[in-house]
Image (cartoon, helix red, strand yellow):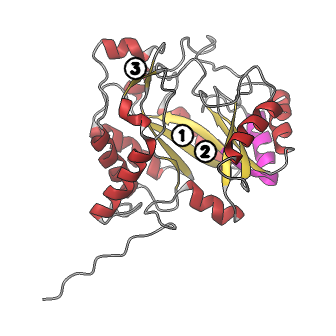
Amino acid sequence: MNTPLIPAPELWGEKRFHTWNYEMHNQFQNKVFKVMLDAGFTCPNRDGTIAKGGCTFCSARGSGDFAGRRRDDLVTQFNTIRDRQHLKWPNAKYIGYFQAYTNTYAPVEELREYYEVILQQPGVVGLSIATRPDCLPDDVVEYLAELNERTYLWVEMGLQTIHDSTSELINRAHDTECYLEAVEKLRKHNIRVCTHIIYGLPQEDHEMMLETCRAVAKMDVQGIKIHLLHLMRKTPMVKQYEAGLLRFLEQDEYIKLIVDSLELLPPEIIVHRLTGDAPRDLLIGPMWSLKKWEVLNGIDAELKRRNTWQGKLWRES
């Protein structure tokens, strides 16, 4: 009796998923890291334009807790973060990452000043701009299209979940349809889109989280960041946690969930992130998230244990 052949895993370098580092080496034949910046923006669901209080999980620094200091100008921020990273990667190139708050939430003339000054810095090969899907007016998209013609550009947008009931619970202040429309606007200009999702949101179970992943897999997006929910002090989500709406994922549970997700993603989607950390002094939980490399090594080990890889179940799904 013939034994069926087991397909060889699709490898990206030494990894079983399409990593950001692998893609950067393909694009630039060099190590490339993101320089995280805080340009002084706010958000429309913080300032009362569409809502108040912000997303319930978002920190006081607008999810830019590791970005440059807001009181410093952008060039000073860039040089400070770059020099710190250079201790580890002395010959790297850089992508200016406008990370904190909503980085298209300003008149296009103001955005042009911010983005262009970073593009002028030596060694910068591109920009990554974090924003919301409801902050992409036509003139801003036209400017992003112009940038896309002359530099390596990513627009990163937080979807967080495909479930509108969860979006309401976390005060996201936009629905899934808004997100899909924003992706369509950007992709008309061939602008690369990286979708952010969060695992561990209040009242979501394993299947709900995988439903979000399946939905992203069907979108015309080129990258994904999967975040573990971090509960941080002085965020509105603390009250939801105290009310019993939230439980922390266990480390092994999260690792298996990530591997389940990678199997569902098409091989061409670039995985920008699979976990992250929060400032230790702000973190309420889960505390195991501080062991970032232990989590990443656990994901690699689970992929190998299952003999699986990114995209293995993509055709089936």
47 lies above or below 88 = above
Q: Residue at x 28, y 34 (%)?
A: 205
Q: Main secondary structure of the magenta part?
A: helix
10 Å crowding of disc 2: few (<14), some (14-19), many (20+): some
Q: Say left or right for 35 vs 75.
A: left
Disc 1 secondary structure class:
helix
Instruction: Say which residue label 1 marks.
Output: 180
> What kind of residue is marked 3?
Leu
Q: Is residue 294 visible?
A: yes
**Are dots 1 and 3 in contact, CB under 8 Å?**
no
Q: Between tags 1 and 3, which lies in front?
A: 3
Q: Quadrant of the N terminus?
A: bottom left
| Residue 76, position as x, y percentages in the image | 81, 31
Q: Where does label 3 land, which residue?
A: 169
The front one of 172 and 310 is 310
Q: Is residue 33 shown in magenta?
A: no
Q: Sequence order check: which comes first, mark 3 or mark 2? A: 3
Instruction: Using a 10 Å C-alpha cutoff, classify the residue at mark 3 as few (fewer than 14 neighbours), some (14 to 19) or many (20 or more).
Output: some
Tell which circle, 1 or 3, labels the residue nearer the N-terminal end: 3
Q: Residue furthest left?
A: 1
The number of callouts visible is 3
Region of the chain picked out in magenta, as a range: 138-154
Q: Residue at x 76, y 42 (%)?
A: 144
Q: Residue 257 at x, y = what percent?
A: 32, 46
Q: CA distance from mark 3 to mark 2?
A: 26 Å
Separation of residues labelled 1 and 3 (CA atoms) = 20 Å
- Label 1 and label 2: CA atoms lie apart by 6 Å
Disc 2 marks which residue? 184
Residue at position x 50%, y 60% from top? 18
Circle 3: element type:
helix
